[in-house]
Amino acid sequence: MRLFVRAYRSLRIGSTAVAIYLLYKVPAWTRRLLQRPPLGDDELTPTHQRAARLLLWTALGLRGVLIKFCQVVATRADVFPPAIIDILKQCHDAVPAHPFEEIREQVERELGKPLDAVFREFDREPIAAASLAQVHRAVLLHGEPVAVKVQYPDIERIVHTDLANMRRVCAVYEFFDPQPIALLPLVQELTRHLELELDFEREADCADRIRDLFARDGTVVVPQIHREWSTRRVLTMELVGGIKITERARIEAAGLRPTDVMQELMRIYTRMILAAGFFQADPHPGNLFVQENGHIVLLDFGLSKELPEGFGLGLFELMFSMMTLNQSAMVRAFEELGFETKNGDPSTFLLITERMMKRSDTGRFEGEFTEEMTDELFDAIRENPVVSVPSDFVLVGRAFSLLSGIGASLGARANVLEAMGASTGATS
Amino acid sequence: MAAPSTDLPLEYSREELLDSGSYDEPLIAGGVRCHGGFEADGSYRSPRTIHRAPAVQAWQERLRREDCDLIQIDPALMPPQYPNVEQAKLLLLEGVREPVVRRLTIISIVEGFGAIIRDVGVPDLASHVVEPITGTSLDHLEQGLFEAHARDEAGYRDEGGHKQMWEAARDLALENPKIPGDVLMQMMGQGPGRRRERKRGFPQIDERLERMLATMAQVLAVEVFAMGAFDWGERLLSDSEVSAEPEAAGRMVSFIRADESPHVEYLRTGLSEVAARTLRTVDGGSIPGREVVRGMLHSTLRGLTRERREEQRNDIRGALIEAMQVHANPASLLERFDELETKWTPPEHTGFEPEDPEPQA
């Protein structure tokens, strides 16, 4: 990477960090000088909004890791206030495409052959472009249409530079601020995610694993990977079509009921997360399609996640206890999942469960369990900051939150208990 | 049920049907406060039965007074447990604990799933039933009967329900065993390809009404058949050869069994009330409720006693054989295990076959 690009990125990241730091600190120092009390949470909302907009602006300018960082922050409602989350939630991983010549060079370098030795056709315009890679439609020599995901040249070095800059910024921040927000763990979390996403061979393995998981169903479509034309940076896969999962009108025009689509989607995710302990952790609408026969298409397995042993059962217990408003079971589930209080006092969990109890008294399973409950849970945790949240839980919470968003777009609700395997025929 | 009394009222509020009253001593299992509790004489009293039990009794009496049949599912239709008590004992004595732990855990989860009954939509029954329904259990389904059932199964607020009680019985008897990681996969592994088609059996009636009645018929059948699981659990967990706490674990299952009895009774009462009435069809006509209820019970019982039993047995057997591999001689163990299996052929008739139309005069 050219030196000046690296210097420019470092400068932008550093100056944004300083600007955000000063946004908070200058008023605080001024108030201290004037012997006024510090600003309260509500009074800080405009500052939070300005800081989030500044970060978003820099991220959209620099793309790459910064976009991912914003997305990670937006999932941490347990750490950051809603004013920041709401703005950073808008940070979509869709960016202008890289020039075709760059992509051609990358594919040829990776496959060790000229493009036309592998593909009969290769569209110059991508189907989609994100911060780490873009996807092109192509046709193999024997005539099979495929999708080719190509990692941007040099992206690994950009990622490493940006991560190093961010670690430096966090270290400086923690040096100056006696009670910092734990930013370094977020950067570490981001580093782990990016390592996963940059390895397309692992992504191919994950796709195979998820396909196997649903092999008996015959209703979940995971594109077949063409291993012979795939490498760590290029992924050639079966081209599958479908209706974007949030396009309600097209789904209904195909004779499908949005409620059934949502229920099936929830079943797929509860099965991956709770039963298999391995899931595609990025269920945003660009990665999910529904075919006219009702089959669900899953795409993009870069952020697939293996959960620790017993996590699925623990999460099942937590969800079940939340839905049945069973406070004592909820406390046990928190402990089993690895939530921790800094002083080891379980009464903190009781505070959180009491807040959850106030949420609703209906005890119904049909409805916006995921979004309402995960939002409420994360709010409760943020307000009781002695609790640390397992990072796996954050990823799962994000997945359910995205599913809820899809439900809202479809105007449909899933019955979570039914998705977990309950049917009226299974009751006793 | 208690002896008939004609003085019992037929109308109850939701609060009454959900009322447990107070206990002399609460039921605590495995450190968890559960529902139900003990009277001064030490006897166990099920939750939410202060008014619910006499209410169901009153509605059943009314049916008898009106000369209507109370639905009865033939216990001979109940498939045997797999593995049965002797087979489960053999596994535990031979150190193959996983299948029994898995089975007990699945029972606890399925019990909890019973709470989904509170999500069954109850339509405006008065508009779908020709005869009046005041003073019947049908009129109280949404007024506390479904909710009480849900709370019994999954627990509510700070009280555990049957889910937690089964877990406690398992943990007492088998000393907090490690839960197999594939428990949920065993339950959720049934993909849509194997899910039964939800075909409408009675499209001539309101869809919501049909769904509610079909659910009640299904749940009734499963509740009746669950008595086999209670027998199995009580016998196994109270056996001192395999249970660390035979008395406490067995008693826990007996409490669950006692709690389940009101579920069977209110469901068969409600379906009997429908069978004694006439349902309006969507085209403005009518259909005897008896025809609808019998048709639903027949198809449910056929499914449960035939293909579903085979599916469940095959699923359990696969995991069971895998678990036996920890044994020094798995082939011999499997042979001994198979010799203990209860031979069973589903009865030819469910007792709810469609009736011949009235002979023409």
Image (tube, coloured by chain):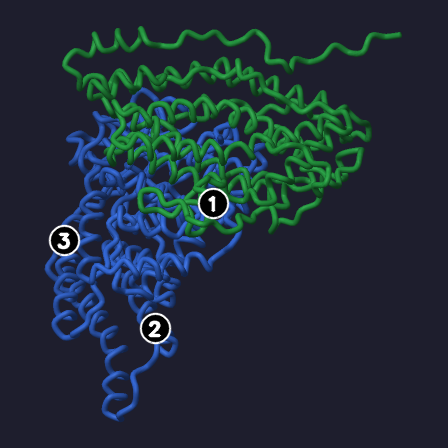
A252 and A136: which one is in front? A252
In the rendered view, does B155 fall on the left or right side of B241? Answer: right
Residue B256 visible in the current orientation = yes
The residue at 39%/10% (across/down) is B342
Query: x, y (%) of residue B21?
Result: 53, 50
Query: x, y (%) of residue A377?
Result: 37, 56
Q: Nearer the viewer, mark 1 or mark 3?
A: 1
The residue at 35%/17% (across/down) is B83
Image vertical order of residue B120 relative to residue B250, above or below: below
Q: Earlier in the sequence, mark 3 or mark 2?
A: 2
In the rendered view, does A227 fall on the left or right side of B117? Answer: left
Distance between the Cα atoms at labels 1 and 2?
Answer: 63 Å
Give the farthest residue toward the bottom: A34
Distance between the Cα atoms at labels 1 and 3?
Answer: 69 Å
> Which chain is green in the picture?
B
Q: Quadrant of the N terminus of chain B?
A: top right
Q: Determine if marks 3 and 2 fall on one subunit.
A: yes
> Which chain is blue in the picture?
A
Q: Amino acid at mark 2?
A: Arg
Q: Which residue is mark 3?
A: A160
Q: Amino acid at mark 1?
A: Glu
**Mark 1 Cα-neighbour bin, 10 Å: few <14, some 14–19, many ≥20:** some
In the rendered view, does B55 fall on the left or right side of B255? Answer: right
Query: x, y (%) of residue A307?
Result: 25, 40
Distance between the Cα atoms at labels 3 and 2?
Answer: 28 Å
Q: Which residue is mark 1?
A: B39
- SS assignment at label 3: helix
